[in-house]
Amino acid sequence: STHCISSAASDVYKRQLANTSIEWMIADLAIQSAGGETVPIYQSNLAHEVEYIVNDCGAAFVFAENAEQLEKLVEQRPKLANVRKVIVMDGAAGDPEWTIAWDDVVALGKEKLEENRAAIRERIAQVTAEDILTIIYTSGTTGKPKGVVLTHANMAYEVRASLDIGLLSEEKLELLFLPMAHVFAKLLQCIWLGVGQEIAIDADITRITQNLGEVKPAVVASVPRIFEKVYALSLIHI
């Protein structure tokens, strides 16, 4: 999935094109810690669809999973005037003036963290419940996609509600494979962080039945179509 971030302090926007992964989660938490707003985009989106969302949210930084996702941005680069840098999560970066590799960003981050630890803590402390957490775009099936704004308070309510009904608890392991561009997956991420349970992440839905046997999760949240596919696969192997 892709995501865009905007910083309330500096009006800097970012976005990310990547499947659900631990790198996605790390990037998202870094964005939030900087006071930014994550704007996810499906990794299946075409280049012109990516360009629309990136420009509509005013993204200045983009996280791209691999060469395939990077190519979409390169194709639309002349139209992406606001994008300052593209961070490539898996694989080599391209033009050094426009792209940088994930490992290089992590190394730079560790260096800056040591130098600016107090400032970073101050930035985190400034985030309020009413600040925007994420902007999730609609599918655009009836027109141009529209960004739906969700605040930290919106998601904090959902976390509390899940605790009240016992949906998840600290001892329940969860398997997550939904795309982070979907609000349901974002909700599950927030619950995970709010509750503190263990989570297993694998975006490859062809491995769902294998992962169920290996991980043995207590909770698997998804949409009906995925469960139908798992059921069909289980019948094949009977």
Image (spheres, grey):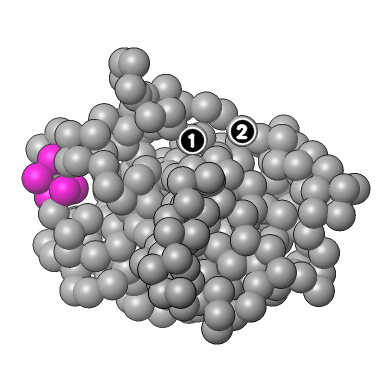
Which amino acid, by three-letter code, is at mark 2?
A: Leu
Q: Residue at x 13, y 54 (%)?
A: 71
Q: Is residue 108 visible?
A: no
The x, y position of residue 197, in whole percent, is 74, 69
Q: Residue at x 80, y 54 (%)?
A: 167
For the residues labelled 2 and 1, the Cα–Cα distance comes to 8 Å
The x, y position of residue 194, in whole percent, is 76, 58
Disc on the earlier residue, 2 or 1: 1
The residue pinned by badge 2 equals 150
**Front-most of residues 199 and 64:** 199
- Find out whether the residues at labels 2 and 1 contact each other: C-beta distance under 8 Å: yes
Q: Residue at x 65, y 72 (%)?
A: 217
Q: Is residue 170 visible?
A: yes
**Front-most of residues 228 and 120:** 228
**Front-most of residues 201 and 113:** 201
User: SS at mark 2?
Assistant: strand
Tell me, yes or no, whether the highlighted magenta stretch contains residue 75.
yes
User: Label for residue 136?
Assistant: 1
Residue 64: quarter of image: bottom left
Q: Which region of the structure is painted magenta? A: 72-76
